[in-house]
Image (cartoon, helix red, strand yellow):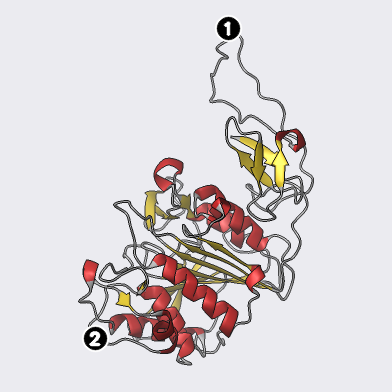
Amino acid sequence: MLLVDCSNCRRALELPPGAHSIRCAICHAVTRIADSRSLQPPPPQGFYSSTHQHQPYYPPPPPPFTAPSPYNHAPRGPPPAVHGRKRAVICGISYRNSRHELKGCINDAKCMKYLLVNKFNFPESAILMLNEEEADPYRHPIKSNIRMALYWLVQGCQPGDSLVFHYSGHGSQKRNYTGDEIDGYDETLCPLDFQTQGMIIDDEINETIVRPLPRGVKLHAIIDACHSGTVLDLPFLCRMDRTGRYVWEDHRPRSGVWKGTSGGEVISFSGCDDNQTSADTDALSRITSTGAMTYSFIQAIERGQATTYGAMLNAMRSTIRNTDDDLGGGGGIVTSLLTMLLTGGSGGGLRQEPQLTANEPFDVYAKPFSI
């Protein structure tokens, strides 16, 4: 891949081999290769040019940064224009026509957008939606587009901004060899092209949207995926102790690597613990299926149960425990958009517990929930 600066917003883009132009997923400007600052990625160590068999290849020196970046993968160039005091990235992946197919994820994304616009007054123009149904290929939830969307979410944010990242899709784990994970595994999100391009690990997510967050900015993440308990790598995890009260566990890495913010606030709701899986249903059509965690999150808000973060977590867990689990695939929730936003389900239960993590511990019983 070649790195190319967008001719309009100067965001770094990945130009596929042989292509002579590329359109930016954010500002939609078309950049010709003549407008670019292109670099061939350095080849593996020991690589020799096929035309100069005995002469090692030395890559050109990298260009100077135009501004210091708090995280390694930030696109070069000036930050993009602020898109409002409220911004959101919503990603729903169905993995359609594959053995990994999920039925509820695109509906999760649509329902979350509906909630943010109609309940929390997010401007539609400030919501970046990624799913397979989008006509714009740069809005498809492939790895490079998700990375670009996460960069967009936090860049240019200012005190008073409220940011949301919602993801509904597959999650997984990879062996961690640095000793930073208590269970020995990094948590991951699975883009649409994860089988060829790889997964997005929690270290990168933390580095991209957590560590650069400045003071006065609040980010909420709602992650409806398997193994997602600590997928933002936040330092503190809320657990229920033997007395039935929530307490904070310290998950700061023993290596001392900083996993907090630059003064901002990050709170994440996830579908299940790191060693659990999240429910999806294939009992009915894609029009009516949703993910259990997204359903319980929206229902808690619509029912007025989201007064504090502790009340929110209790309501979500209660909804999932009481949800009918006789649907296809061993569990799930099936409802229309209107029913999902205004009413609830009843019945058996699902084997997953929504989790709450944060960059700093706080009193979950006293802190009001707000986006």
Residue sitting at x 55%, y 85%? 369
Give residue 81's position: percent from left, percent from top: 76, 61
Disc 1 marks which residue?
54
Q: Which element is circle 2 on? A: loop
Q: Which element is circle 1 on? A: loop
Residue sitting at x 42%, y 41%? 196
**Image side of residue 19 versus residue 105, left or right:** right
* Disc 1 residue crowd, few under 14, some 14–19, many 20+, Cα 10 Å: few
Q: Earlier in the sequence, mark 1 or mark 2?
A: 1
Give residue 306's position: percent from left, percent from top: 49, 88
- The numbered mark at residue 347 is 2
Residue sitting at x 77%, y 49%? 8
**Image side of residue 121 versus residue 94, left or right:** right
Residue type of the residue flagged with mark 2: Gly
Residue 304 vertical position relative to residue 234 in the rendered view, above or below: below
Residue 317 vertical position relative to residue 261 in the rendered view, above or below: below
- Quarter that holds the N terminus: top right
Foreground residue among 190 and 108: 108
